[in-house]
């Protein structure tokens, strides 16, 4: 086992990656922990409830009548922030003081639902759940929580970046132990017999588990240490219901017992995921394993957005949301049987861990110790292998799984924007109607149309005023007044269209602005940054293996001997750029198509500066040119991403660490430099 551990700690890039992630975790957690108001809140906890209520009332009066908002005598120096701080503190204290009433209310609700019979009958899942809920809260009512400041515990509950870093390091360790040796051809020297294979698998599995546990302890221990240093952990012997956010916890635990169980469940979850990653590494190549792992995690994220409690709770990411196991009582429907979410999570993690370990062991023992070359299907022409560019394309798309990544990116984007919708309602309908008439260059007929619409609305306004002045309680009058009021909703869209029309010059055109605003406003730019992160993630998953393929297989020695290194690098770079452009189209075109299907893209040949958003652009640039330049910019950024991946691959000289570094570097840097 120690030799397997040396393979991990002996890899400089893996060690550097783990060290950087642990340092980043500590820095990000410190920023997370200090972003709230827990430091001044700890001071307020030393005061009585009556004092805090008096402070809240006094601050409310000052917020209403004082013109000076800054006060150096306050903890925050701002009467508005101080008022919110005192209110938040009182909410936490009252949640603990009103615990008996809260439990009685939850129990009464369960009994009322059970007695009405409207939520299930007999032995249905709903009826059993309500009976169990009544019994659980009858036991929990005996708890006597106390008011105590638990800011250090609260900051731990909703921080999940440590989970993300732990998953990434578990994936790196699994691929390094189970996939790299097979692809390098050295695994055949290590397990010549059945007994040797089993012993080797045991050592690798134990090494993987030990590495994951050690890294998890470092990640979570850092968070715990920072919390304890900043705010303390409070009285760990008090009931966990004393912690704000855990008042409805259905289990009889102390705060110390809760923290121990909280981190133990995190460790079990990471071990289960490490076993799953080991299974993927034994079944697939490194590049395909990495893609499959990202696909499973992405699918889990999608399941977490569904309304089903089962889908939200038992996906791979939901299993690690340990805080949600304790913030309330939730029963999951397992074939009509109510199972508490905590028990279901324990069972699923245990089954996932056991099944993954068994499956990975079976594959490790039975599978060939070297990566077999794939045969081309019968009758398939070998011309693509003879032509150098075709051969590079084949290696990228087939051997390194880039085709699968591209198809997955297309599927993700199509599903993301399948139900795309923008502004709706009467105002948008009126504005679109006016825009359909005014679209194009300004003319006398369009000016007359605007005047007619204004006159029409003035007449409706006068009719409405006359009806309201009659003051008759007639149903007919009430209905007519409502209809006239609905017609007057066209006033704001008409004013918008008129203002836009009157701002045009003779060379400009009136353009329906909604689709272009959806593409280029703040929301559109945020969506573009997310799509760019998806694009760079796709490049990071497959290009490092593509650039390192010759080095890994020692073919690079033959290429250098033949003096063809420069030509091969040029072809690889060109192939990667073409793939990046294809990914660019897959990442950004679905959103443009969705906007076009819902709102159209009118007047594409008109001057772009006809729109106020593009007023600074030259008159010679049409709207289609703006769209083309935007796509060209994304394509250029994708090619820059290719260059970064190539540079990282050349420096790291190992595809797995290079891919993990790029997965962290490119999408993360995009979201960091261009925050949503």
Image: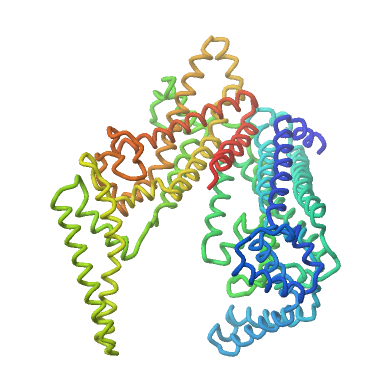
Q: Please name the colour scheme applied to the rendered image.
A: rainbow
- Towards the viewer: 149 or 446: 446
Determine the residue positioned at 63% across, 83% down.
110
Q: Percent x, y for residue 547?
A: 55, 26
Determine the residue positioned at 72% across, 53% down.
33
Question: Can the viewer see residue 288?
Answer: no
Q: Is residue 493 above or below residue 328?
A: above
Q: Quadrant of residue 288?
A: top right
Q: Is residue 402 above or below residue 464?
A: above
Q: Quadrant of residue 476?
A: bottom left
Q: Is residue 153 left or right of residue 590?
A: right
From this viewpoint, which residue is outermost toward the left?
445
Q: How many marks?
A: 0
Q: Percent x, y for residue 36?
A: 69, 56
- Towards the viewer: 205 or 604: 604
Q: Percent x, y for residue 127?
A: 60, 82
Q: Is residue 673 left or right of residue 198?
A: left
Q: Is residue 259 left or right of residue 127?
A: right
Q: Is residue 646 above or below residue 68?
A: above
The N terminus sits in image quarter = top right
Q: Is residue 629 left or right of residue 79?
A: left
Q: Percent x, y for residue 29?
A: 71, 49
């Amino acid at each position: 086992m120690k030799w397997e551990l040396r393979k991990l700690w002996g890899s400089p890039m893996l060690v550097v990656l783990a060290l950087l992630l642990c340092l980043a975790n500590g820095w990000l957690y410190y920023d997370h922990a200090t972003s709230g108001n827990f430091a001044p809140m700890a001071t307020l906890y030393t005061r009585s409830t009556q004092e805090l209520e008096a402070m809240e009332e006094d601050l409310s009066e000052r917020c209403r009548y004082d013109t000076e908002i800054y006060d150096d005598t306050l903890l925050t120096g701002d009467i508005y922030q101080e008022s919110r701080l005192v209110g938040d503190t009182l909410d936490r204290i009252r949640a603990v003081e009103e615990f008996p009433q809260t439990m009685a209310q939850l129990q009464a609700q369960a009994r009322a639902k059970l007695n009405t019979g409207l939520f299930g009958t007999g032995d249905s899942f709903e009826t059993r759940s309500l009976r169990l809920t009544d019994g659980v809260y009858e036991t929990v009512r005996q708890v006597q929580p106390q008011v105590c400041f638990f800011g250090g515990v609260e900051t731990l509950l909703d921080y999940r970046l440590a989970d993300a870093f732990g998953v990434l390091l578990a994936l790196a360790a699994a691929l390094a132990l189970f996939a790299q040796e097979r692809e390098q051809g050295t695994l055949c020297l290590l397990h010549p017999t059945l007994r040797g294979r089993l012993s080797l698998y045991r050592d690798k599995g134990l090494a993987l588990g030990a590495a994951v546990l050690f890294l998890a302890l470092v990640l979570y221990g850092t968070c715990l240490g920072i919390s304890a240093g900043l705010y303390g952990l409070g009285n760990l012997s008090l009931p966990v219901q004393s912690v704000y956010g855990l008042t409805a916890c259905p289990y009889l635990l102390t705060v110390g017992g809760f923290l121990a169980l909280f981190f133990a469940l995190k460790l079990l979850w990471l071990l289960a995921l490490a076993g799953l990653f080991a299974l993927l590494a034994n079944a697939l190549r490194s590049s395909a394993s990495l893609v499959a792992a990202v696909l499973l995690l992405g699918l889990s994220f999608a399941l977490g957005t569904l309304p089903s409690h089962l889908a939200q709770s038992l996906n791979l990411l939901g299993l690690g949301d340990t805080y949600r196991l304790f913030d309330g009582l939730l029963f999951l429907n397992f074939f009509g049987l109510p199972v508490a979410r905590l028990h279901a999570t324990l069972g699923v993690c245990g089954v996932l861990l056991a099944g993954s370990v068994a499956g990975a062991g079976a594959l490790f023992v039975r599978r060939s110790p070297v990566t077999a070359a794939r045969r081309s299907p019968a009758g398939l022409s070998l011309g693509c292998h003879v032509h150098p560019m075709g051969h590079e394309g084949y290696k990228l798309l087939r051997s390194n799984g880039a085709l699968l990544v591209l198809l997955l990116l297309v599927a993700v984007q199509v599903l993301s924007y399948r139900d795309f919708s923008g502004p709706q309602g009467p105002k948008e309908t009126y504005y679109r109607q006016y825009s359909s008439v005014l679209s194009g260059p300004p003319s006398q007929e369009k000016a007359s149309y605007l005047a007619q619409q204004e006159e029409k609305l003035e007449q409706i306004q006068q009719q409405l005023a006359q009806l309201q002045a009659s003051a008759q309680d007639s149903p007919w009058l009430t209905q007519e007044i409502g209809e006239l009021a609905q017609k007057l909703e066209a006033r704001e869209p008409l004013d918008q269209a008129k203002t836009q029309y009157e701002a045009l010059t003779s060379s400009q055109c009136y353009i329906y602005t909604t689709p272009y605003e959806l593409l280029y406003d703040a929301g559109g730019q945020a969506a573009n940054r997310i799509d760019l992160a998806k694009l760079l993630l796709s490049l990071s998953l497959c290009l490092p293996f593509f650039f390192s393929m010759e080095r890994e297989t020692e073919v690079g020695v033959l290429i250098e001997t033949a003096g063809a290194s420069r030509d091969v690098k040029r072809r690889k770079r060109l192939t990667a750029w073409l793939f990046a452009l294809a990914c660019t189209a897959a990442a950004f075109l679905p959103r443009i198509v969705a906007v076009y299907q819902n709102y159209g893209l009118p007047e594409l040949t008109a001057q772009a500066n006809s729109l106020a958003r593009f007023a600074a652009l030259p008159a010679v640039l049409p709207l289609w040119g703006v769209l083309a330049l935007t796509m060209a910019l994304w394509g250029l950024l994708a090619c820059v991403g290719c260059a970064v991946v190539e540079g990282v691959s050349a420096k790291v000289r190992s595809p797995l660490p290079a891919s993990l570094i790029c997965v962290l570097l490119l999408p993360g840097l995009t979201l960091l430099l261009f925050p949503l």
